[in-house]
Amino acid sequence: MNNISLALKSLRFKPLATTLNIILMAVGIAMMTFVLSASRQLEDGAMRDAQGIDLVVGAKGSPLQLILSSIYQVDVPTGNIPLATQALLAQNRMVKKVIPLALGDSYEGFRIVGTNPDYITHYEGELAQGKLFDLPMQVVFGAKAAARTGATVGATFVGSHGLSRGGEVHKNAPYTVVGLLKPTGTVLDRLVLTPVDSVWKVHEVVNGIDVNDKEEKEAMDADRELTALLVQYSSPLATVTMPRYINSQTDLQAAQPALEAAKLFRLLGVGVDVMRGIALIVLLSAALSMFVALYNALEERKTDLAILRTLGAPPIKLFSLLLIEGLLLAMAGALAGWLLGHAAVEVLGHALSDDQNMTLSGWIVTPDELWLLAVAAVVGFTAAFIPAIRAYRTDIATTLAH
Amino acid sequence: MIDISKLVYRYKAVPVLNVEAFRLASNDHAAVVGPSGCGKSTLLHLLAGVLTPQAGHLQIGGINIQDLTPRATDAWRGKTIGFLPQRLALVPSLTVAENLLLSSYANGQRADKGRAEALLRTLGLSDKAASYPHQLSGGQKQRVAIARAVFNRPKLLLADEPTANLDDVACEAVIRLLTEQANEVGASLIVATHDARVLAALPQATVLRLPASNHHALGVGHE
């Protein structure tokens, strides 16, 4: 028999109060875990997607919308920009890399992105099957898009107009699947990638222009447009000059992912803070409830404690006994809450995976979560401290004589 | 075993107990008698080192209890004293066997399960080892409490009103059990009682009579 087994037996003796306290504690810690894990994963995911992209150039509009549409592939684009912009930027010596993006169509809800192989290389995409596209109308599927649509190498399909499901189908311009990518954990996984030319070609057919007519083609090339350009600088100096340079061009807008992501997370941060605040209130009430339970139980257990003293137990033993009871309660609640929180993240991850925009997993544990253990310990300690002090001061003579 | 002289205990400056002189040899038994509120419990608490006297001399087994540090008093109490309180105070969340092992735990010793089994066998409670206190009869509870008091083989077994609310048969049985167990572990037994039947059941015992305390009669005392 030791402090822990004795504390456990006494907790088991009051199943209702013990269960109630564990549940309260678990709910608080679950909320904490959820907020911590989900916000961390979203932030990490957002960071990964924006990694190495210093600037996004697109049509004028909201910079946040530009970032959302061209980096995270969630919002609709702000508009189109002339194809010539790509060459203009590529010439700039402060620019290391320019990746074109042409959006417009989707397949079963997955965006068909016109780009070049640099885009795949940028996100360290590797082929799982087949090869990269080298001709128009060839496509490579991201891992998640492939898994969800059941795309296989050699299969053909037609895209539908617009970025959401249910758009008009481009019957006359079928795509051929030439490759499937391995999962990267980035935006790449949920995209269907094709050369920029494919996107143009699909829409030319719609517009009834004959690409094979040389004259018409030339006239059209001048009108060619892209949706956005992802830019990587070659010099940190560009951070200062480039956005200003581009924004001064009448039709162009430059948005900095780092800046816009920070703005976005400040907005999300309010929600996170609110949830964290609620979690804190729940934890506080858990502490209070635990305190009341331990304190009231003490009244009934005064004789037990006095008896322990007559059997030779020093006061410090009673103190630690009560403290351990509080800590055990808190830790049991913390463990249950931690599991509950991760389960909730996993459930949310599954719910959102239909939406394709976010990947959340309940199986990812961050070192931050060790803090929760400390939080739980503090709650247990706080709740048990005063009862433990009272146990320490048990007056044997008075207790046993009455 | 016990050597008391001019022992005074006051509670908030009010004298509760005053013992001029009392001696008890090892293995001898004693009865502390007197009307309700005369300080019998207080004397037992002083003997157990739970209360500290304000004046006088109190020596148990050659040790002056007042000279011990609080920590040493606790350790000494665990080794030397067996205490049977008026309220039996079995811990409700623990089984009968665990209630006995509480003595080992309180002393910081390894749980002596053999001792618990042997004691329960002696007291005819072997089949109750895994029962909880609320599943026992009053007599069984009393036997468990006695077993717990003698578990650590004390030198001094103190029993506070052990026969209150018992019929004659039970009263005699309890006193017999207490003396048997005290003799078994070689302890002196001191019973505080206002029950005349106890004296009859302890013909060999030294008797210490405490006078009624006026202050208790006035209701300001502490017992």
Image (cartoon, coloured by chain):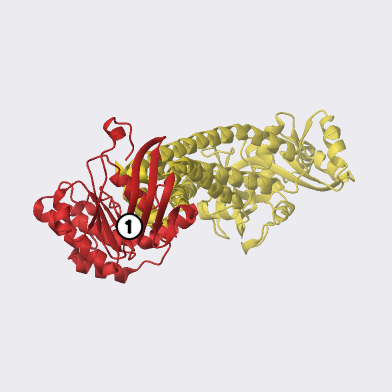
- Residue A203: image x %, image y %? 65, 40
Q: In the figure, residue A24 lies in which quadrant?
A: top left
* Quadrant including the N terminus of chain B: bottom left
What residue appears at the point 33 percent right and 48 percent down from the top-left corner? B43
* Quadrant including the C terminus of chain B: top left
Q: Which chain is depicted red?
A: B
What residue appears at the point 66 percent right and 38 percent down from the top-left corner? A69
Badge 1 marks a residue whose secondary structure is strand
**Residue at the spot of label 1:** B23
Q: Amino acid at mark 1?
A: Arg
- Residue B57: image x %, image y %? 42, 52
In the image: residue A279, left or right of residue A231: left
Q: In the figure, residue B131 lies in which quadrant?
A: bottom left
Compare residues A61 and A102 and report the one nearer the observer: A61
Compare residues B163 and A327 and report the one nearer the observer: B163
What residue appears at the point 34 percent right and 47 percent down from the top-left corner? B19
- Residue A78: image x %, image y %? 69, 32
Q: Mark 1, residues whose alpha carbon is within 10 Å: few (<14), some, or many (≥20)?
A: some
In the image: residue A397, left or right of residue A218: left
Which colour is chain A painted? Answer: yellow
Write down the chain letter for disc 1: B
Compare residues A5 and A374 and report the one nearer the observer: A5
In the image: residue A210, left or right of residue B175: right
| Whether residue A108 is visible | no
